[in-house]
Image: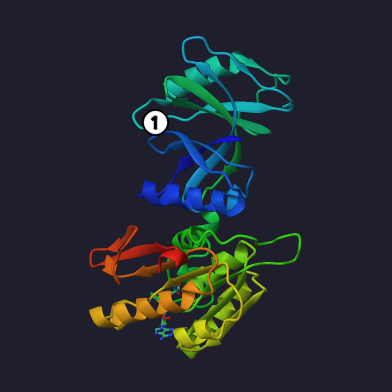
């Protein structure tokens, strides 16, 4: 099946890796057919696109046509619709509505009921490779739910918290699978340095079972309050040293994802090397998918960060995505 995604955020490589990871966690297929700026034409099965953090919208591919002689055939769709061409930066609104009209009149569709305000179907048109590709939008990420979970809006907050959108993306990068499965065999995601529970909340909201630890009793109590507040029920958070917690895990976990201590408790080089070395060593035998961690330095234990996220002038966070087989 073909789909069209519009990537969001500043780092398009990070957004594309999140999309790839989510697709590969639920389907055996992911391939990019074409890519123009933020727009990706790709193949995968029908998956839960609503999990995505850094993808603005996804449309199911319907048909394509040459720009010069527009003609689209759309089968089996009834109900009202609106055509909304995707415009790239610099293109005018006027150009967009003219293109929308042209496309609208070239559709071979059962329904002819156009509703620009509240349509049942939104058709998106993208200019890719000298053609217009038409899709039906299936997911729109307006970001509101992430904003509503920002640190200062939670019952327990701390400046160490990650933005919920980034926390969600980190969980997705693990490629953890099997959440909300019909067999009742829900997989587990763990965060051994869980702080206020921001990563656990995002994983829990996606339907994973979550477990975490923190050395601070205040953080443990706070993350439990936050998890409860957002309705996550299947969790366990303990006051423990991260490495004791990881050693106590029996069986496999679907993903290990964590944000290592930084800032005031900033790790000195040796401490960071040791901490990451132990994290990887203990995680590699229990993690079935990826180990994802965030650190305040671009290199550690012979690894270079896969992505960096600018926080403010004196702080960037570096994201590492590690395959347990490579440790
Ligand atoms: C950067 S914060 C995590 C923030 C978290 N991602 C959030 O969204 O709130 C790192 C956490 O590691 C905890 N920590 C430091 N050393 C630890 C250790 N040895 N074991 C477990 N937790 C530890 C700190 O108490 C702190 O809450």
**Against 278, is 7 above or below?**
above
Secondary structure under tag 1 reads loop
Residue closer to the observer: 166 or 319: 319
Q: Left of 147 or right of it: where is 82?
A: right
The answer to which image quadrant residue 206 occupies is: bottom right
Residue at left offset 54%, top offset 71%: 200
Residue at left offset 42%, top offset 77%: 281
Cβ of mark 1 under 8 Å from ligand 1: the answer is no
Number of numbered discs overlaid on the protein picture: 1
The answer to which image quadrant residue 145 occupies is: bottom right
Question: Dot 1: within a 10 Å radius of its alpha carbon, few (fewer than 14), some, or many (20 or more) residues?
Answer: some
Residue closer to the observer: 120 or 286: 286
Q: Is residue 168 visible?
A: yes
Q: Left of 271 or right of it: where is 286?
A: right
Q: Quadrant of ligand 1?
A: bottom left
Q: If the image is split into quadrants, where does the C terminus sit?
A: bottom left
Residue at left offset 36%, top offset 76%: 276
Q: Where does residue 234 sit, x and y in percent of width and height? A: 67, 74
The answer to which image quadrant residue 72 occupies is: top right
Residue at left offset 53%, top offset 54%: 144
Which residue occupies the extreme front position in the image?
325
Which residue occupies the extreme top position in the image?
69
Q: Which residue is mark 1?
A: 88
Q: Where does residue 171 sit, x and y in percent of width and height? A: 51, 63
- Structure colour scheme: rainbow
């Amino acid at each position: 099946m073909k789909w069209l995604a519009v990537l969001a955020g500043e780092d398009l490589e990070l957004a594309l890796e999140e999309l790839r990871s989510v697709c590969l966690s639920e389907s055996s297929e992911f391939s990019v057919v074409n890519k123009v700026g933020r727009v990706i034409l790709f193949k995968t099965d029908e998956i839960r696109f609503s999990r995505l953090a850094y993808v603005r919208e996804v449309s199911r591919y319907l048909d394509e046509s040459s720009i010069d002689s527009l003609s689209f055939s759309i089968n089996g769709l009834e109900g009202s619709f609106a055509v909304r061409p995707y415009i790239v930066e610099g293109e005018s609104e006027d150009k967009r509505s003219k293109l929308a009209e042209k496309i609208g009149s070239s559709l071979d569709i059962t329904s002819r009921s156009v509703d620009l305000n509240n349509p049942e179907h939104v058709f998106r048109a993208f200019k890719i490779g000298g053609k217009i590709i038409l899709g039906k939008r299936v997911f729109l990420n307006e970001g509101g739910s992430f904003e509503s979970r920002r640190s200062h809006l939670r019952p327990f907050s701390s400046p160490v918290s990650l933005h919920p959108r980034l926390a969600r993306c980190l969980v997705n990068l693990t490629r953890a699978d099997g959440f909300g499965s019909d067999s009742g065999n829900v997989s587990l995601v763990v965060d051994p340095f869980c702080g206020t529970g921001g990563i656990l909340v995002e994983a829990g909201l996606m339907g994973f079972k979550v477990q975490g630890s923190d050395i601070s009793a205040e953080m443990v109590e706070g993350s439990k309050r936050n998890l409860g507040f957002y309705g996550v029920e299947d969790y366990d958070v303990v006051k423990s040293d991260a490495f004791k917690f990881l050693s106590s895990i029996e069986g496999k976990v679907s993903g290990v994802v964590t944000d290592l201590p930084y800032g005031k408790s900033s790790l000195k080089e040796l401490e960071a090397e040791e901490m990451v070395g132990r994290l990887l060593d203990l995680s590699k035998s229990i993690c079935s998918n990826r180990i994802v961690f965030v650190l305040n330095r671009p290199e550690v234990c012979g690894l270079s960060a896969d992505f960096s996220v600018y926080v403010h002038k004196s702080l960037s966070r570096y994201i590492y995505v590690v395959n347990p087989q490579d440790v």
